[in-house]
Amino acid sequence: MGGSLGRILELLGKMSDRELASMIDHTLLKPQSDYKQLEKYVNDYKKYGFKALVVPLSLVPKAVELGGTGIRVATVIGFPLGNTSTRVKVAEVVEAAELGAREVDVVMNLNAFKSGDYNYVLNELKRVVGEARDRGVEVVKVIIETGLLTDEEKVKAARLVLESGADYVKTSTGFLGEGATVHDVSLLYRAAEGRIGVKASGGIRHALDALAMIDAGATRIGTSTGDKIIEEFLKMKVG
């Protein structure tokens, strides 16, 4: 879990379940997920009041159909490896907007980043962010895959995200390397200088884990177990 247990317990006492849910992106990205499971996630979204429902691009129309106008759908771009071309990522953003997605989580190009080609990374992110803004997408989050980066690289990546005009730097896809850690969230929070948000994602499955990430500076939590986290949170509040 990490973080100060005292501060985490203080958060537990102060926050309501609705406040916690409003910081959670309830996420369904496993390739074996079917429409029945999607329907459950849509119902979870409505029941608990999550911030967004994150689904693959191909499932955006079905999520909108099942959820109606009241659902905030997000999707992923260049997922999960980040090494599709800039043109493909831009095209995905265009389609996402046309299908009704209001947020996008785009994977940074790690090949270029690891090569030190920061101009490529920045220019690609600027194009993606610019297209998203032009198309009415409200929030852009950039996944930097912290589990594959050194601390120095994490800070550099966060600053590129900041310079690109995106809204959030996000730790992980949950498919590669290590997921979110308190250390990484705290590091990104400091690097972001309060100018963009930090989304913690990858391996967050329990209420105390989510609260630890929030304590470290995260303002969004990405998880496939949002329903379980809220139920666990409520039991802890009663206890």
Image (cartoon, grey):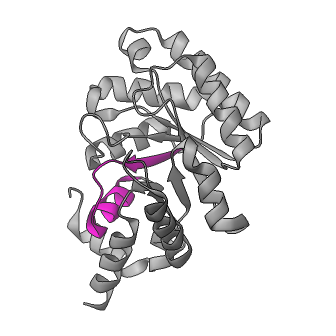
Vertical placement of 123 versus 101: above or below? above
Question: Residue 195, can we see it?
Answer: no
Vertical placement of 210 versus 55: above or below? below
Q: Residue at x 55, y 62 (%)?
A: 51
The N terminus - image quarter: bottom left
Q: Residue at x 51, y 52 (%)?
A: 54
Q: Is residue 78 magenta?
A: no
Q: Which residues are magenta?
A: 196-217
Vertical placement of 74 versus 26: above or below? above
Residue closer to the observer: 139 or 74: 74
Residue 210 horizontal side relative to residue 130, left or right: left
The spot of residue 191 in percent (x, y) is 44, 35
The spot of residue 121 in percent (x, y) is 52, 17
Q: Is residue 212 magenta?
A: yes
Residue 169 horizontal side relative to residue 65, left or right: left
Q: Residue furthest bottom?
A: 238
